[in-house]
């Protein structure tokens, strides 16, 4: 599986001994469909896909996670009928939510060991393959739950300006200015990035008008939010 950008450190079954190695051409690729909230991948959430062993594997994943402290959470967990488990760990204090490589590898080893033990007891298939990583730059942010956590970072926001008409969806780079929980709205301000600068400005800073500009959107008008990386 190709590495995700930025911080998607990955540890998989291939890190184990030669006896455990699965040939790379036999590995099942994760679905590359457009991510959606709760899809078990970049959209976070838990997806078991009717695997009879999925709930037991999830309970083991959570059991192992408890050994790593309160600042590591399960961002996503997905099982597939072919016996693959995809886990993404989220480190809450980290700017991007990325655990250290050592944490990823340590969790992978502990999770694999426990899966093997339970498999030998007959509660799980014995040939499960796992991949542990961290959310990449394309992680979807939940609205409004994730917005305050990342309010100091620019975000790529796809939105509509009227929920009652078939207006086109727009995409801009914003900072979160504030959340208005009573009205179910979020207020955005322009991020000072190249996508928002006038090419004719030739490197000049934002004008007062640009700095003061605000856009208020209801949660329903925000269609997609990801972190923005100026690469």
Image (tube, rainbow, N blue to C red):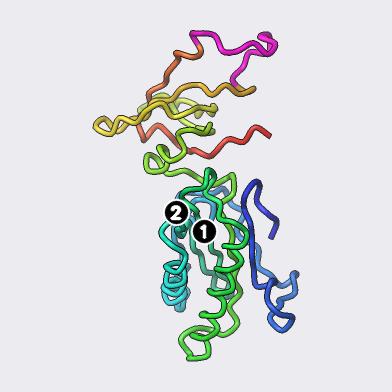
Residues drawn in magenta: 196-209
Image coordinates for residue 106, horizontal then vertical, percent: 58, 68
Residue at position x 53%, y 59% from top?
Answer: 88
Image coordinates for residue 90, horizontal then vertical, percent: 50, 54
Q: Does the magenta run of residues contain 182? A: no
Pointer 1: what residue?
89
Residue at position x 49%, y 53% from top?
Answer: 91
Q: Is residue 40 above or below residue 157?
A: below
* Quarter of the C terminus within the rendering: top right
Q: Secondary structure at mark 1?
A: strand
Q: Is residue 199 above or below residue 98?
A: above
Q: Label 2 crowding class (10 Å Cα cut-off): few <14, some 14-19, many 20+?
A: some
Q: Secondary structure at mark 2?
A: loop
Q: Label 1 crowding class (10 Å Cα cut-off): few <14, some 14-19, many 20+?
A: many
Name the residue nearer the viewer: 187 or 26: 187
Name the residue nearer the viewer: 96 or 58: 96
Residue at position x 52%, y 47% from top?
Answer: 94
Which numbered tag is attached to residue 153?
none
Q: Looking at this rendering, what residue extends furthest in the left direction?
A: 182
Which numbered tag is attached to residue 38?
2
């Amino acid at each position: 599986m190709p590495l995700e950008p930025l911080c998607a450190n990955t540890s998989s079954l291939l890190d184990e001994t030669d006896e455990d190695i699965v040939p790379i051409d036999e590995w099942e690729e994760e679905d590359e469909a457009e991510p959606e909230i709760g899809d078990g991948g970049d959209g976070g959430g838990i997806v078991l896909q009717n695997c009879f062993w999925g709930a037991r594997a999830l309970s083991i994943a959570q059991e192992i996670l408890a050994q790593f402290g309160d600042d590591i959470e399960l961002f996503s967990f997905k099982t597939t009928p072919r016996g693959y488990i995809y886990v993404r760990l989220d480190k809450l204090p980290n700017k991007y939510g990325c655990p250290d490589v050592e944490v990823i590898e340590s969790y992978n080893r502990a999770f694999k060991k426990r899966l093997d033990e339970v498999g030998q007891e007959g509660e799980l298939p014995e040939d499960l393959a796992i991949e542990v990583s961290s959310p990449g730059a394309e992680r979807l942010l939940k609205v409004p739950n994730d917005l305050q956590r990342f309010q100091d970072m620019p975000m790529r926001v796809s939105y509509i300006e009227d929920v009652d008409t078939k207006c086109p969806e727009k995409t801009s780079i914003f900072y979160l200015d504030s959340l208005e929980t009573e009205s179910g709205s979020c207020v955005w301000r322009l991020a000072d990035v190249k996508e928002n600068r006038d090419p004719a400005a030739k490197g000049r800073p934002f004008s007062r008008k640009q700095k003061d500009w605000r856009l208020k959107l209801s949660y329903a008008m925000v269609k997609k939010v990801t972190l923005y990386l100026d690469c």
